[in-house]
Image (cartoon, grey):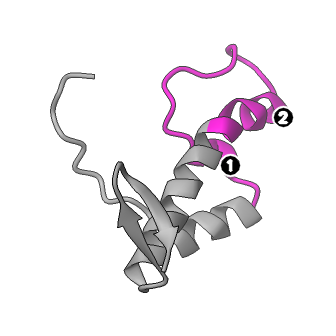
Amino acid sequence: MDGSPDRRRSPSLGAVLDALDAGRIAELSSSKGGPAEGAGPRARREFARPTVRKELSALVALALVDVGVASWDLPGRARSS
């Protein structure tokens, strides 16, 4: 990473859930690297799963805060209102 901010817009929760429903989990992973060259679809999905789960959890927390059913409690975890 070069220290410059990532200026890409994050997808909405709905867009991420639609991608998961369509079986495109590997496309959602932001982790660097990946399974070995030529790995099959299952290996790519399994490699992406932990990163996508973590990022999806954060996205859901942000969506809950956005609609007012959760709020932030330092040190950075959402809590129910």
Name the side, left or right, on which 23 lies relative to 74.
right
Disc 1 to disc 2, C-alpha distance: 10 Å
Residue 74 at x, y percent in the picture: 34, 54
Residue at (53%, 20%) from the top-left corner?
A: 33
Q: Nearer the viewer, residue 55 or 25?
A: 55
In the image, the segment drawn in magenta is 22-50
Q: Nearer the viewer, residue 76 or 64?
A: 76
Query: SS for tag 2?
Result: helix
Q: Is residue 33 above or below residue 64?
A: above
Hey, which quadrant is residue 10 in on the image? bottom left
Q: Is residue 1 above or below residue 70?
A: above
Quadrant for the N terminus, please: top left
Q: Is residue 29 above or below residue 20?
A: above
Is 27 within the magenta?
A: yes
Is disc 2 surrounded by few (<14), some (14 to 19) or many (20+) residues within 10 Å?
few
Q: Of marks 1 and 2, which one's residue comes earlier in the chain?
A: 1
Q: Is residue 15 above or below residue 41?
A: below
Is disc 1 surrounded by few (<14), some (14 to 19) or many (20+) residues within 10 Å?
many
Residue 3 at x, y percent in the picture: 17, 27
Residue at (64%, 62%) from the top-left corner?
A: 19
Name the side, left or right, on which 36 lies relative to 12.
right
Check if mark 1's residue and mark 2's residue have beta carbons within 8 Å.
no
Judging by the rendered image, the residue that carries numbered circle 1 is 25
Q: Amino acid at mark 2?
A: Arg
Q: Amino acid at mark 1?
A: Ile
Query: SS for tag 1?
Result: helix
Disc assigned to residue 42: 2
Hey, which quadrant is residue 52 in on the image? top right
